[in-house]
Amino acid sequence: MQRAVLQYLSLNLDMQEEATKLGNLFRSMDKSRTGKLTKDQIREAIKKLKNYDIPEQEMNEVFSQMDSNKDNMIEFTEFLSSAMSQQIALKEQNLKIAFDFFDSV
Ligand SMILES: [Ca+2]
């Protein structure tokens, strides 16, 4: 499994750049430096980045889709998974491996 991910990454050199960008974005959203995003922090970021005041119901839907372990917080793996879900079809386990890989370089 891990070999497959690394092989995939080596074929997609832009992936690391993309993950770095997403990492920077995540950190800029994580104003309380907890390593996790709250619903309010995401709502604030959407407002700032997309100039869109997201309605509560839509926010709840987006949030529950992102929060795959249902702890009411968005971890980086969940954020990355959500942000990249349209580009890559990796499961969360694979993303965790990918994240650990990026984190170690
Ligand atoms: Ca979560």
Image (cartoon, rainbow, N blue to C red):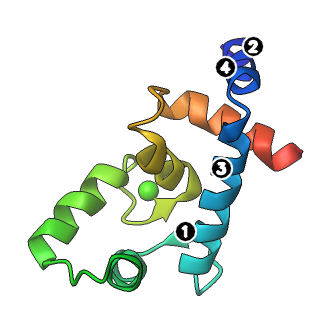
Q: Give whichever of discs 4 and 2 has the lower sequence position.
A: 2
> Which residue position is annotated with label 4?
8
Is the residue under label 1 in contact with that under label 3 (CB below 8 Å)? no
Q: Residue at x 58, y 35 (%)?
A: 95
Which residue corresponds to the image point at 43% horizontal and 66% vertical from the top-left?
Answer: 73
The kind of residue tagged 4 is Tyr
> Which of the pair 38/3 is nearer the observer?
3
Q: Nearer the viewer, mark 2 or mark 1?
A: 2
For label 4, being within 8 Å of ligand 1 is answered no
Badge 1 amino acid = Lys
Measured as percent of width and height from the top left, residue 67 is found at: 36, 54
Question: 10 Å neighbourhood of mark 3: few (<14), some, or many (≥20)?
Answer: some
Query: Mark 1 to mark 4: distance in Å?
Result: 27 Å
In x, y percent, where is residue 3?
A: 75, 13
- As helix, strand or loop, the secondary structure at mark 1 comes to strand
**Residue 35 appears anywhere in the view:** no
Comparing marks 2 and 3, which lies closer to the viewer?
3
Mark number for residue 3?
A: 2
